[in-house]
Image (cartoon, grey):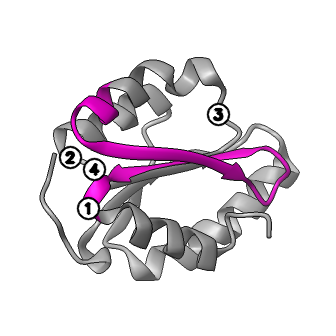
Amino acid sequence: MRGPAPLSQRLIATGFAYVPELRAVQAEAVTRLLPVVRDIRRHGSCALELCHVAEGALDGYVEEGVNLWDHAAGGFIARLAGARFETHPGVGGTDLFVCAPQHGFDELLQAVREAGFLRE
């Protein structure tokens, strides 16, 4: 896992729902998050992206609508490597999954909140 880095230097992964209306809402949130992080990636596999968080190639992951089978194994690996993950109510009405190294989790969660990923 990569050591602490300022939020502006963190590489974050995400994914998008198959439902066009939810995908549009997610895209708006990503647009607001992009200026405060280094960049956004999308590999298409929640489990793979969580393993990239574990190895330090990514600094965080956020996606609404992933299922338990999408994140169970990758989340376990990330947690063993020192990451923290939580689910929260997403703006689209399904669970939002957030994962980052323990040392940067709270700051990423706050940025995700400010970008509009969470249902408040």
Cα distance, mark 2 to mark 3?
21 Å
Q: Looking at the image, which is closer to me, 8 or 77? A: 77
Tell me the residue that label 1 is attached to. Answer: 103
Crowding at dot 3, Cα within 10 Å, few <14 / some 14-19 / many 20+, comes out as: some
Cα distance, mark 4 to mark 2?
4 Å
Q: Residue at x 76, y 37 (%)?
A: 18
Cα distance, mark 4 to mark 3?
18 Å
Tell me the residue that label 2 is attached to. Answer: 57
Q: Which mark is residue 18?
A: none
Q: Looking at the image, which is closer to me, 91 or 35? A: 91
| Residue 120 appears in the figure | yes
The magenta stretch spans residue 11: no
Span highlighted in magenta in the image: 77-103
At mark 1, the secondary structure is: helix
Mark before the other along the chain sequence, 3 or 1: 3
Cα distance, mark 3 to mark 1?
24 Å
Residue type for callout 4: Leu
Quick check: marks 1 and 2 in contact, CB under 8 Å?
A: no
Tell me the residue that label 4 is attached to. Answer: 58
Mark before the other along the chain sequence, 1 or 2: 2
Crowding at dot 1, Cα within 10 Å, few <14 / some 14-19 / many 20+, comes out as: some
At mark 4, the secondary structure is: loop
Q: Residue at x 49, y 32 (%)?
A: 46
Mark before the other along the chain sequence, 2 or 3: 2
The magenta stretch spans residue 85: yes
Quick check: marks 2 and 3 in contact, CB under 8 Å?
A: no
